[in-house]
């Protein structure tokens, strides 16, 4: 019996591989680089999106792999139990502060949002499970970089670049090293409108056997104050200590 080749399946996987390699991509560039008719690309993209395997970025309208797809890979197959371990901590933070709480996993060049608890306050933070963000401009990303040595941080900066998102984004690799060393000493990271204006984030990171994770609380800039910041930092450091002992 001869082999069966289904062109639409082949094209769908080529699109997924292309998006993975580029981190994110638009319909026009996918059509051009893969030499597939734009209307065909559009149909496949919308199908993959409806199935939950890719998501559309609100920042630049490009498509990126979702965590649903990410979870199929062997790299993350061992990471899913983390949700069972960490969920009670996330829920406690959410209940106490009423602000948006995130859990992310680190990759070579980005963080992937794998859980989110929306805030109950009047203004919340728009993020999606499965979305990706660079490491250098987010609280969670910088916290994860602090788990790596300076050579790895420099390699990240040189290979992936330090894209500008706001006037506060760190775009100099030597300043990034200084920031990461500070984070290592204090045990937590801050994102003061570095990825998005009007947003302040506090994050910690920890390692398991195979993965790097970070937890953050995101607060609209106008709501943050020293008392609130100190309280959040104390709670996050307690969680970091608990996770470090749990995964020792």
Image (tube, grey):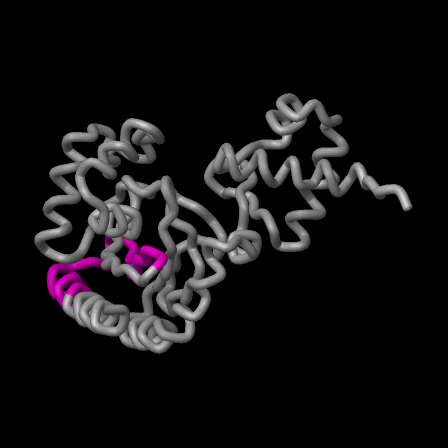
Residue at the image position 39 percent from the left and 59 percent from the top: 124
Q: Against 164, is 215 above or below?
A: below
Q: Residue furthest toward the right?
A: 1
| Quadrant of the image occupied by residue 3 | top right
Quadrant holding the C terminus: bottom left
Front-most of 102 and 104? 104
Q: Position of residue 152 (x, y in %)?
A: 24, 38
How many numbered marks have been drawn onto this rendered protein structure? 0
Is any part of residue 50 visible from this angle?
yes
Q: Against 113, is 14 above or below?
A: above
Front-most of 20 and 123? 20
Residue at the image position 50 percent from the left and 33 percent from the top: 22
Q: Is residue 171 magenta?
A: no
Residue at the image position 53 percent from the left and 39 percent from the top: 20
Q: Residue furthest toward the front?
A: 1
Q: Which residues are magenta?
A: 210-233
- Apparent side of residue 15 relative to residue 144 in the rendered image (left or right): right
Q: Is residue 215 magenta?
A: yes
Q: Position of residue 109 (x, y in %)?
A: 37, 40
| Quadrant of the image occupied by residue 215 | bottom left
- Apparent side of residue 103 relative to residue 59 in the rendered image (left or right): left
- Apparent side of residue 113 relative to residue 53 in the rendered image (left or right): left
Is any part of residue 191 visible from this angle?
no
Front-most of 123 and 185? 185
Q: Position of residue 177 (x, y in %)?
A: 16, 37
Residue at the image position 46 percent from the left and 39 percent from the top: 59
Q: Position of residue 121 (x, y in %)?
A: 35, 66
Front-most of 236 and 82? 82
């Amino acid at each position: 019996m001869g082999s069966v080749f289904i062109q639409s399946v082949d094209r769908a996987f080529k699109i997924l591989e292309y998006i993975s390699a580029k981190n994110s991509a638009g319909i026009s560039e996918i059509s051009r680089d893969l030499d597939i008719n734009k209307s065909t690309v559009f149909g496949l993209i919308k199908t993959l999106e409806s199935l939950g395997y890719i998501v559309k970025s609100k920042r630049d309208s490009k498509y990126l792999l979702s965590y649903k797809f990410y979870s199929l890979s062997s790299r993350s197959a061992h990471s899913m139990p983390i949700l069972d371990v960490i969920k009670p901590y996330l829920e406690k933070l959410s209940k106490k502060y009423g602000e948006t709480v995130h859990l992310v996993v680190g990759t070579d060049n980005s963080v992937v949002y794998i859980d989110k608890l929306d805030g109950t306050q009047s203004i919340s933070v728009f993020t999606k499970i499965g979305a990706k963000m660079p490491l250098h401009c987010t609280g969670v990303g910088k916290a994860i970089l602090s788990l790596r040595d300076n050579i790895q941080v420099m390699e990240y900066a040189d290979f992936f670049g330090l894209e500008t998102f706001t006037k506060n984004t760190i775009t100099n690799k030597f300043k990034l090293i200084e920031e990461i060393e500070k984070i290592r000493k204090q045990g937590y990271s801050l994102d003061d409108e570095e990825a998005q204006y009007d947003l302040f984030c506090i994050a910690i990171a920890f390692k398991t056997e195979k993965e790097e994770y970070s937890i953050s609380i995101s607060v609209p800039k106008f709501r943050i104050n020293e008392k609130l910041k100190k309280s959040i930092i104390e709670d996050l450091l307690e969680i970091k200590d608990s996770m470090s002992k749990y995964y020792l």
